[in-house]
């Protein structure tokens, strides 16, 4: 049966590739060469070198798509992906996996379409700085957690374009047959895989497959070539690499080493202990792992996290030591610049950035004997020029701060006093050095939710330096420090000098009355229970509630005031109800002023008012009448509730005062 033209063309391209890469000329000396007479199995071509010192090649060729597929449609999609990838690179966008809808774009519009689409995707990413996955206009975007180029795939599932979900699936299904076809001795048995453009990252997938598969199942495959696109051919597997890995030998030959290192990297990605042993040998030989790609180093760090879970601390600490001075990320870099601009990035990327999270594992598993090693590295990162790496250094340091004053079961200190003091000192140095970068200050502020053994002067410094925080995290930490100093610090830490909270009590009153709304809201939120929904003792916070209500209306703060009242009214009605009545007056005054000047949180006022009113109504006739009287007092300047609702609240009462209030309501109805 004659060979298809595409097979002949592919074979000719491989022959050119071998001539250029190996400087060996090959001639075609056979087609459909039978390798097993009993079954009729055969391989596509026999290639014989002009120089007899080189082996004859038994070549089998296959495509990753079926014969019936519309390859033109596949190539058009691949062309668009290539243009989009270049556009995303030009914008510095990395670390995303994007699934696309169908592209039906004329050739003359493809470049313009790619530019416009990249602009849209860049804007979409900017509008979703925290979400792990998001979608719009048929595009679905996911964060990959690394700093690699953007990867594109088809939205509807790649199966719409070819019969396999991935290159790996194609290999799993086709290789057993190809292995049988190449069952011939005395030849260099080679596969040539044609991508046809449908898998933009097919070469990596094929490398990964041949690096991680059980190759004893395919003993007849010596080499694998992969053609990404016409004129772009790569050798992706050589059995000599597998043999070196099996024998734990690092090859010295540069060409073989170029295949061996990616092979090891893929093995690291599947947590292969033999690959870990090879990295030790590489460090012994080269003094570093700079020969690995960023992706390979990242895989080793991920491996290290698994080793931490297995508590293999010697290997974990070895990985930390190997990468502590890694050049990635370079400086300057995009994440540093974004932090300089005040953008608080949520990315965990780069080698030293990822390493901070591995060091965190050492801390959270309480390997206190190893803390000094981690602390030395963290301190170096914490005061470097890269703001992004400084922010990541906060991750392990925060866990150390959490444990500074912990106690062992026998009552002894968890860590030496000198180490605890050093952690506190580093935290304060970072605080002082972060004022020039608000985004970094947000990260640093977290320490002071846990470093509570502060003197009066230290509390004042923390409050002052965090005063510029606008983001929620820094604001909450600052307000926590103030609340803790004012209400809880006095009787803590017997080993420290006496703490006098009076000035912080005064400051708490002042900030609740007239501080910025973000601080007033956070203080009320924390008194209401904060994220754990554990309200503070009413007797402790009651004086401060009066201070809050004496200040200007703060809609978001009133949300938390209402939570406090709901929690405590059953046990402290005599004290809570007057506060609610005062709060209703403040809301009424706020609404009455709305027609005269802009006010904040206008849309929240009716709901806050109704919720507060319901608490009062639940406490009986007296408080109900007081509330209705207050509402009528502000008419017609502020109509807070309609007459029907007021009648409803009074309907169960028949006292003289209730009757008088009903008369006032009826009079208002007639006048209205």
Image (cartoon, helix red, strand yellow):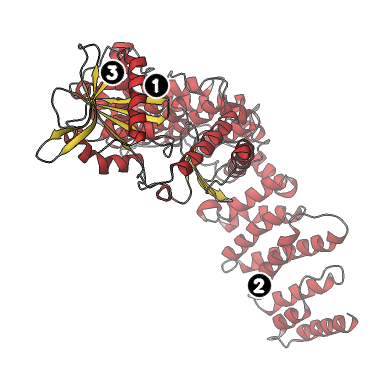
**CA neighbours of label 1 inside 10 A, class few (<14), some (14 to 19), many (20+):** many
Whole-angstrom CA distance, mark 1 to mark 3, is: 45 Å
Residue under pointer 1: 323
User: Which residue reaches farthest left?
Assistant: 38
Instruction: From the top left corner, tell me how far across and down residue 2 is, in percent.
Output: 28, 36
Res 373 → quadrant: top left
300 vs 513, left or right, is left
Residue 459 location in percent, x, y? 60, 34
Q: Secondary structure at mark 1?
A: helix
Horizontal side, residue 169 vs residue 344: left or right: left
Residue 147 coordinates in the image, percent (x, y)? 48, 31
Disc marking residue 26 = 3
Q: Nearer the viewer, residue 359 or 423?
A: 359
The residue tagged 2 is 614
Q: Nearer the viewer, residue 156 or 596?
A: 156
Query: Which quadrant would residue 415 be assigned to in this image?
Result: top left
Q: Residue at x 38, y 25 (%)?
A: 233
User: Front-most of 485 and 106?
Assistant: 106
Question: SS at mark 2?
Answer: helix
Does 286 appear above or below 379?
A: above
Q: Nearer the viewer, mark 1 or mark 3?
A: 3
Q: CA distance from mark 2 to mark 3?
A: 91 Å
x and y percentages locating residue 432 in the rendered image: 61, 25
Residue 97 seen from this side: no
> Is residue 516 shown above or below 656?
above
């Amino acid at each position: 049966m004659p060979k298809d033209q595409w097979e002949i063309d592919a074979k000719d391209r491989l022959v050119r590739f071998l001539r250029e890469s190996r400087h060996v000329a090959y001639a075609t000396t056979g087609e459909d060469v039978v390798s097993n007479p009993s079954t009729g199995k055969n391989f596509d071509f026999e290639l014989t070198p002009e120089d007899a010192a080189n082996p004859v090649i038994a070549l089998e060729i296959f495509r990753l798509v079926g014969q019936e597929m519309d390859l033109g449609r596949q190539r058009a999609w691949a062309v668009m992906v290539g243009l989009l990838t270049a556009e995303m690179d030009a914008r510095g966008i990395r670390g995303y996996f994007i699934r696309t809808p169908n592209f039906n774009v004329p050739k003359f519009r493809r470049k313009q379409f790619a530019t416009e689409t990249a602009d849209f995707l860049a804007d979409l990413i900017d509008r979703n700085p925290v979400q792990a996955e998001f979608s719009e206009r048929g595009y679905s975007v996911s964060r990959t957690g690394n700093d690699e180029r953007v990867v594109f795939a088809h939205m509807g599932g790649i199966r719409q374009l070819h019969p396999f979900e991935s290159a790996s699936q194609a290999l799993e299904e086709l290789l057993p047959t190809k292995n049988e076809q190449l069952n011939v001795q005395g030849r260099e048995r080679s596969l040539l895989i044609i991508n046809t453009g449908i898998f933009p990252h097919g070469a990596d997938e094929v490398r990964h497959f041949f690096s991680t598969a059980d190759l004893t199942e395919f003993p007849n495959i010596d080499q694998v070539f992969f053609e990404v696109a016409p004129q772009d051919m790569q050798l992706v597997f050589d059995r000599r690499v597998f043999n070196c890995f099996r024998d734990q030998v690092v090859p010295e030959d540069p060409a073989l080493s170029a295949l061996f290192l990616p092979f090891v990297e893929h093995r690291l990605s599947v947590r292969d202990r033999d690959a870990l042993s090879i990295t030790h040998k590489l460090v012994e030989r080269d003094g570093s792992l700079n020969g690995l790609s960023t992706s390979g180093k990242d895989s080793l760090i991920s491996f290290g996290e698994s080793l931490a879970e297995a508590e293999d601390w010697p290997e974990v600490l070895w990985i930390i030591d190997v990468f502590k001075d890694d050049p990635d990320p370079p400086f300057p870099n995009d994440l540093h610049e974004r932090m300089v601009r005040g953008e608080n990035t949520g990315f965990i990327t780069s080698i030293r950035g990822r390493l901070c999270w591995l060091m965190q594992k050492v801390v959270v598993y309480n390997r206190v004997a190893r803390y000094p090693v981690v602390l030395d590295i963290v301190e170096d990162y914490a005061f470097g020029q890269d703001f992004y790496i400084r922010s990541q250094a906060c991750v392990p340091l925060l866990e150390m701060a959490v444990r500074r004053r912990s106690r062992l079961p026998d009552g002894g200190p968890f860590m030496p006093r000198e180490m605890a003091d050093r952690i506190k000192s580093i935290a304060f140095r970072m605080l002082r050095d972060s004022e020039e970068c608000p985004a970094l200050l947000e990260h640093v502020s977290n320490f002071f939710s846990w470093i509570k053994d502060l003197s009066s002067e230290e509390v004042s410094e923390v409050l002052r330096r965090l005063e510029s925080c606008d983001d929620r995290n820094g604001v909450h930490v600052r307000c926590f420090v103030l609340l803790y100093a004012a209400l809880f610090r006095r009787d803590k830490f017997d080993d420290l000098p006496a703490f006098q909270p009076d000035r912080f009590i005064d400051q708490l009153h002042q900030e609740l009355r007239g501080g910025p709304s973000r601080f007033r809201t956070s203080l009320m939120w924390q008194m209401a229970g904060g994220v754990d929904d554990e309200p503070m003792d009413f007797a402790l916070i009651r004086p401060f509630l009066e201070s809050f209500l004496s200040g200007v209306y703060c809609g978001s703060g009133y949300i938390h005031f209402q939570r406090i009242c709901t929690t405590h009214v059953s046990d402290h009605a005599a004290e809570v109800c007057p506060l609610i009545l005062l709060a209703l007056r403040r809301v009424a005054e706020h609404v009455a002023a709305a027609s005269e000047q802009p006010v904040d949180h206008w849309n929240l006022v009716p709901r806050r008012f109704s919720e507060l009113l319901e608490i009062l109504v639940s406490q009986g006739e007296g408080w109900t009448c007081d509330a209705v009287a207050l509402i009528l007092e502000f008419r017609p300047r502020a109509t807070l509730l309609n007459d029907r609702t007021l009648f409803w609240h009074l309907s169960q009462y028949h006292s003289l005062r209730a009757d008088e209030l009903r008369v006032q309501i009826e009079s208002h109805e007639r006048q209205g």
